[in-house]
Image: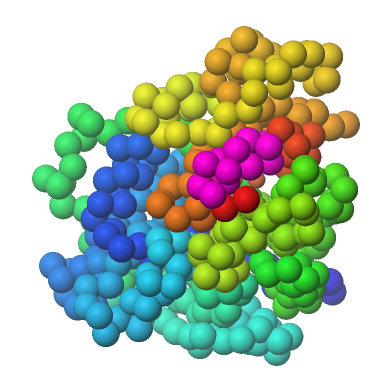
């Protein structure tokens, strides 16, 4: 039996963000990104130490948590990291088995297997460490019928006006990228392979993705028959500071760099996000000159892609369209990617140069090159 079969990871269950003000973050994810706010935990639901909002769109679930007092065990991470992803929860068939196998193979346990029971059923979870202060929680909710997890209640219907809720067409998490410290990418790739039974996908070296200043190396691991894809980046030597080093400096260590969210109509999604003041990275207009000859026939109108700043890449299996937001907090750390796949399973290697030059212009403005 292969390791993949021994550790059947179904999909990403949810992503947990630890933030300074979950109430305001929920407003941002709802009104800028088009997530519906579905559940709440806090003093009113008898949770004394933290407040949380569950936001959902398509198959994407984010959980936004904030400490209510200074003595919250994670409150120091806000000073160190600022707002960011604290946990990527993976849905599994059997929490105890997944946790025990992972720990047996070298994972560091944070919370051993637990079953919490309330009037809605049984919620099972266990947590292990991943890169930096990020964790993975194994979740099984097969016997749980509540709003999200014990402690959470459905959102008070008077809190948000349904008439102001406008989804933007985001459907699923395509991939989540981790930035790790220089020289540690292979160690983390091995962690995902050996501990969690992931397989390694394509690899490209720093010559592929370096620009004059900024360089990185990246490898991709996947599980759940491709439902879970984690590219891992590390900084590579460039003439000046790599965007990955900038991230690690400001985040205070390794962490989640970006979450790519899939849509099947990127033009419509990006128009909706722009109408909500989401800011995107821009590549120069010259990117679109000769794009048709680089990527061949695509069904989208290239003028429209150019107007919106959407990038295109092609491989043997098809093409993909993508665009990147600017960081979503004051620190130049976490950002989002919006992606539409038309057959291609790649991550947009052909766009890296144009994209990194765009990031470097931003770094230059920040004085961090
Ligand atoms: Fe990406």
Q: Which residues are magenta?
A: 355-367
Q: Quadrant of the N terminus?
A: bottom right
Quadrant hosting ligand 1: top right
With respect to residue 243, does 355 lie above or below? above
Frontmost residue, 128 versus 38? 128
- Residue positioned 59% across, 58% down in the render: 246
- Residue positioned 21% across, 35% down in the render: 162
147 lies left or right of 91: left
Is residue 364 in the magenta section?
Answer: yes
- Residue positioned 71% across, 26% down in the render: 312
Q: Is residue 148 at all visible to an observer of this figure?
A: no
What kind of secondary structure does the magenta stretch mostly adopt?
A: helix
Q: Is residue 302 at all visible to an observer of this figure?
A: yes
Question: Percent x, y for residue 10?
Answer: 62, 60
With respect to residue 361, does 63 lie above or below? below
Question: Percent x, y for residue 268?
Answer: 49, 21
Is residue 132 in the magenta section?
Answer: no
Question: Percent x, y for residue 174?
Answer: 62, 46
- Residue positioned 72% across, 60% down in the render: 235
């Amino acid at each position: 039996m292969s390791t993949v079969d021994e550790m059947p990871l179904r999909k990403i269950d949810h992503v947990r963000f630890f933030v300074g003000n979950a109430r305001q973050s929920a407003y941002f994810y709802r009104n800028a990104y088009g997530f519906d706010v579905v559940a709440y935990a806090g003093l009113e639901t008898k949770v004394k130490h933290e407040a949380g909002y569950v936001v959902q769109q398509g198959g994407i679930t984010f959980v936004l948590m904030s400490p209510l007092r200074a003595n919250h065990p994670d409150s120091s991470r806000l000073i160190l990291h600022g707002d960011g992803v604290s946990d990527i929860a993976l849905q599994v068939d059997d929490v105890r088995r997944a946790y025990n196998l992972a720990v047996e193979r070298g994972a560091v346990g944070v919370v051993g297997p637990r079953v919490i029971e309330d009037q809605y059923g049984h919620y099972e979870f266990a947590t292990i460490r991943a890169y930096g202060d990020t964790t993975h929680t194994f979740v099984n909710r097969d016997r749980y019928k509540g709003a999200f997890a014990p402690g959470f209640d459905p959102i008070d219907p008077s809190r948000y006006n349904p008439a102001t809720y406008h989804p933007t067409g985001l459907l699923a998490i395509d991939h989540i990228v981790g930035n790790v410290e220089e020289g540690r990418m292979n160690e983390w790739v091995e962690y995902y392979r050996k501990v969690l039974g992931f397989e390694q996908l394509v690899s490209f070296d720093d010559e592929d993705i370096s620009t004059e200043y900024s360089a990185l190396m990246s490898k991709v691991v996947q599980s759940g028959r491709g439902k879970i894809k984690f590219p891992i980046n590390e900084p590579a030597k460039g003439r000046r500071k790599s965007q990955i080093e900038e991230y690690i400096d400001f985040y205070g260590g390794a962490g989640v760099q970006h979450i790519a969210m899939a849509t099947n109509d990127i033009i419509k999604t990006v128009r909706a996000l722009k109408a909500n003041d989401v800011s995107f990275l821009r590549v120069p207009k010259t990117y679109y000159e000769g794009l048709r000859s680089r990527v061949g026939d695509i069904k989208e109108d290239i003028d429209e892609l150019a107007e919106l700043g959407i990038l295109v890449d092609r491989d043997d299996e098809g093409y993909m369209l993508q665009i990147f937001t600017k960081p979503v907090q004051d620190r130049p750390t976490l950002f989002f990617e919006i992606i539409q796949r038309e057959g291609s399973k790649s991550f947009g290697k052909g766009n890296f140069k144009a994209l990194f030059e765009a990031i470097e212009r931003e770094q230059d403005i920040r004085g961090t090159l």
